[in-house]
Image (spheres, helix red, strand yellow):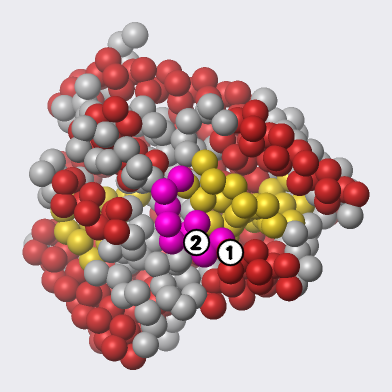
Amino acid sequence: MPTPYDKMWNELNLDLAAHEGLLQVLGKFYGDIYLTQEGRLKGMEYLDFVLSEVHGLRIKELQEAKAQGKKVIGTFCVFVPEELSLAADAIQVGLCAGAEIGKEAAEKVLPRNTCALIKSFVGFKIARLCPYIESCDLVVGETTCDGKKKAYEIFADYAPVYVMEIPQMKQACDRDLWKAEIMRFKAELERVTGNTITAARLKEAIKLVNARRAVLQRLNRLRAVAPAPISGRDALLINQISFYDDPVRFTQKIGELCDELEQKIKAGQGVAPAATPRLMLSGCPMAVPNWKLPFVVESSGAVIVGEESCIGARNTRDLVDESGDTLEAMLEAIALRYMRIDCACFTPNTERLEHIVDMARDLKADGVIHYGLSFCQPYAIEAFKVEKALTAAGIPMLSIETDYSMEDVEQLKTRVEAFVEMLHLG
């Protein structure tokens, strides 16, 4: 069926037939998982609208910005400092994909035993399914895992790619390396955009990104209330959309949604009864439209009250220090803030273990589900130490490893229901 965006998508060289199939599947999936929920916040209507226009209106905004001379920077990881992109008068968008529709194309150039997230973003590019990738003037990768690191070498045959080196430890020499990478990225942005990153521009960008983090922190704090005032599915969607929506508009809309949440809390209203087991998700990120596990969990008698992941608390926990006025001071503050990210790529990673336990306690979680994508070695291996730390704190954990297919839904549901029943009995 023709749409107002067909001409734009055609100019972006999308495979229109395959893209239409993707949007149809996405629409049905979204309807089944999100629109069937009862008692949703009115503020979620904005998120529903954004998702309905995920490849439409927002892409049109990006194209209009490009026509005015702005550059679009695509990223796959929370390590890439958006403050620098904004200070260079560019737009930064997240590119990670959470569907396996491009899997067949990806497996022509990647091993089959590559994690679903990597196969998804490579497949979306090769199969010409993603207007965000096609809108990018620069795609920024990072060395958070061996799979991504080598996949970017292949991806570079199809798009302009720049790779940031992420340290694997947090010693003084690693901090020096990271600071050097920040400076190298700054120079690359200035080259691509033709704009100089000044102290004034960077200070404004830091405040803008901090404001978005702050409103998401507020949302996370409100989720600690019992009964849970918002579903985990809706909270995950908010975090997912934060990666590609206009940051000023998004911050305003989520602020309004939090106001509504506070009214709901005052009235003692929740999305589930107060006795409903409260679960926290931990582990790998969940990119749009990877909503399988949250749906399974919340249709198994539990409610999700937090996400310890890159699309969750790991991305929003820390703000950049705004006290610096010189360019050097602000770049140092950015480097320090991003080095506090507790990705499983680091060794040792005691910070993450402490954060998981603290977060579970703050959210009054009855248990934790550790989610790993199949073939994601860093998070799969670290799950052992996560469970050890949670057990010592008296918090039960269920470890789940899966991919983007729907083949294991019933198996997952059986395991989650058994875990929830155990929490009930406990």
Q: Quadrant of residue 248?
A: bottom left
Give the residue at x 29% y 54%. Answer: 148
- Residue situated furthest bottom in the rendering: 172
Q: Is residue 405 above or below residue 422?
A: above
Residue 33 showing in the rendered view: yes
Residue 112 lies in the magenta-colored region: no
Place of residue 391 in the rendered image (x, y in percent of width and height, measured from the top left): 73, 67
Q: Is residue 90 above or below residue 64?
A: below
CA separation, marks 2 and 1? 6 Å
Question: Which segment did they paint magenta?
Answer: 374-383
Name the residue: 22% across, 22% down. Answer: 15
Q: Which of the pair 425/294 is nearer the observer?
A: 425
Residue at label 1? 384
The N terminus sits in image quarter: top left
Is the magenta region chiefly helix, strand or loop?
A: helix
- Res 167 quadrant in image: bottom left
Label 2 Cα crowd, 10 Å radius (few <14 / some 14-19 / many 20+): few
